[in-house]
Image: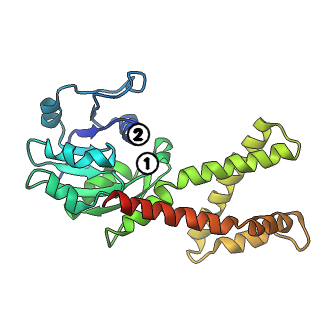
Amino acid sequence: MKYNKIGIIGCGNMGGAIYRSLQSRKIDVIGFDPYLDPKKAEGMVLESDWSQFQKKADLIIVAVKPAEVSKTLRSLESPKAILSVAAGIDTKILSSSAPSGSKVVRIMPNLPIMVGKGALGYYGDKELYESLKEIFSPISYCLELSKEELLDAVTGLSGSGPAYVLRFIQSLAEGGVASGLTYSQALELSIQTVIGGAELLAKELEKNPDTHPEVLKNKVTSPGGTTIAGLEELEKNKFPFAIISAVKRATERSKELGN
């Protein structure tokens, strides 16, 4: 089914990023967020009347806080096609809260959709899958999941992952400053290093889907050289364990939000 106008409830960080991405592709989109800072709302088309918003929107993306999702869906006046980005709120809760006859898909995007480099997992009513991919595939890698509980893992990895990557970039830059570079020099080098490393791995995976990051890591690691010395420090300080633990804890937190 073709949806002519997309409605977004909650136009803060994630909802706003989705709105801007759709807007940039000339997709007809309207928002509803009575609490949005006027500065953040600049350039957006926002409907102030709740009933009118519902009449105008064919498909609704719910981007409010998890605690507000059920209340928001219960206030809908008629069945809708619904995509929910709320962490931890499963499709059973979404379906029971929305008007009878609504179609529901739970999605977990991440903030890099703002620059067309997002990663998104989804699960729910398969009738909405094609529309979902039309909306998001130009701005995000979209992963269809076979089990809903995997969305918690997606939340812990790619949903929260940009924050881990940004913290890594910050630490990498701080290491550069500690070694004599200016902060601006160190930050630019750090950003380009992360982008380049990710793109290098992506290219290798295109050629060979079985490529492991370890293979590329070994290409820049010479016996007795600088890289192995740095890697030894990462291992000594349990860097791999910290990243794995962060993903697992964020996954657990996503599950807690649904309880």
**How far apart are the alpha carbons under marks 2 and 1?**
7 Å
Please report whichever mark, 2 or 1, sits nearer to the chain's N-terminal start.
2
**Residue hosting label 2:** 21
Residue 22 left/right relative to 225: left
Q: Which residue is mark 1?
A: 139
- Residue 31 quadrant: top left
| Category of crowding for the residue at label 2, using alpha-carbon neighbours closer than 10 angstroms: few (below 14), some (14–19), many (at least 20) | many
Residue ID at (37%, 26%): 41
Q: Is residue 182 above or below residue 59?
A: above
Camera-side residue: 81 or 95?
95
- Asked which secondary structure carries label 2, the reply is helix
Front position in the image: 245 or 78: 245
Relative vertical location of residue 97 with respect to residue 151 in this rendering, above or below: above
Instruction: State the residue at coordinates (56%, 50%).
Output: 163
For the residue labelled by badge 1, is the local secondary structure a helix, a strand or a loop? Answer: loop
Residue 206, position in %: x, y? 56, 68
Q: Residue at x 38, y 21 (%)?
A: 38
Asked whether residue 145 appears in the rendered view, the answer is yes
Counting from the top left corner in percent of width and height, residue 243 is at 61, 63
Image quarter hosting the C terminus? bottom left
x, y (%) of residue 133?
33, 55
Residue 236: x and y, percent?
Answer: 77, 69
Specify the quadrant of the image occupied by residue 68. Answer: top left
Q: Are marks 2 and 1 in contact (CB under 8 Å)?
A: yes
Q: Is residue 3 visible?
A: no
Q: Residue at x 24, y 39 (%)?
A: 7
Amino acid type, callout 2: Ser
In the displayed image of the protein, which residue is found farthest to the bottom?
A: 210
Q: Residue pushed farthest right?
A: 224
Q: Is residue 202 left or right of residue 65?
A: right
Q: Residues within 10 Å of mark 1 (few under 14, many from 20)?
A: many
Q: Amino acid at mark 1?
A: Ile
